[in-house]
Amino acid sequence: MRIRIITLFPEMFDGPFRASIVSRATRDGLVDITIHQLREYATDRHHTVDDDPYGGGAGMVMMAAPLADAVEDLKKSARDANEPDPTVVLLSPQGRRLDQRVAADLLAHDSLILVCGHYEGVDERFIESMVDEEISIGDYVLTGGEPAAIVLVDALTRLIPGVLGSEDSAPSDSFGSALGGRLQGPVYTRPREWRGREVPEILLSGDHARVERWRDEQAEIRTRDRRPDLSGSPDLGNR
Ligand code: 9D3
């Protein structure tokens, strides 16, 4: 999978993509991620990429032209490398909310251009003319699209065949199926007793069938208590 990221803050990606499973996937040639400074596509001597909103109001709006030039340049580099036409994704609070199904859908696109927004937003004409899909990572306010792009790349990378070892394979995840998903129950490791707390006896019994049944029950209870929306009840939010 090929991922190109357009951003005003390339440094934000150094840590997250250098540590973690993403860096190993990069080394193994399973994913290729490049970061592109939007300011390089500004055309004035101050490298301006934002301007005042028409109609007034607080904050600045990202200009269409530098964004469009950046996307077109990266599409050209994809074409020159005989890659499939990239899908352009804008990380935006107005986007479709990311979940496991959205991640799996995006994985089907072998080449992505991720655009990280900033300030009060992005000129709508850029979105209309060049963006294939807008994605949000949830209902909370970030300072920009960069953390969202990092989250999206992480969720995508671990779905690429060969990225995860056999012990943690994607299909058995809590959210492996977008519906029918459930939370994992509690897990324990040594020592048997820690600060007066014992590991549940059943896990020490060696009775695999009973252990499986217990884990299944715990997962069910936890999902009902913490995420009734996953159990089929309506999501009433964090009330
Ligand atoms: C005054 C209106 N602003 C605050 C509510 C709008 C606003 C603009 C830009 C709010 C956040 C941002 C920056 N956020 C993103 O670019 C973003 C985001 C997010 O804030 N939450 C969840 N997912 C995403 S994806 C991109």
Image (cartoon, rainbow, N blue to C red):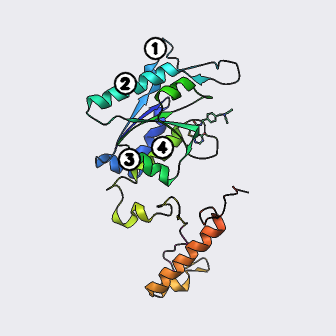
Q: Position of residue 19 (x, y in %)?
A: 41, 48
15 vs 184, nearest the viewer? 184
Q: Which one is earlier in the sequence, the residue at label 1 or at label 3?
A: 1
Residue under label 1, please give it. 43
Q: Secondary structure beneath disc 2?
A: helix
Residue under label 2, please give it. 73
- Between circles 2 and 1, the one closer to the viewer is 2
Q: Position of residue 18 (x, y in %)?
A: 40, 45
Q: Secondary structure beneath disc 4?
A: helix
Q: Which residues are magenta?
A: 184-192
Q: Is residue 155 visible?
A: no
Q: Which one is earlier in the sequence, the residue at label 3 or at label 4?
A: 3
Marks 2 and 4: in contact by CB < 8 Å?
no
Marks 4 and 3: in contact by CB < 8 Å?
no
Q: Is residue 193 left or right of residue 171?
A: right
Q: Position of residue 188 (x, y in %)?
A: 51, 74
- Asked if disc 4 is less than 8 Å from ligand 1, the answer is no
**Residue 39 against residue 215 in the figure, above or below:** above
Marks 1 and 3 sit apart, C-alpha to C-alpha, by: 35 Å
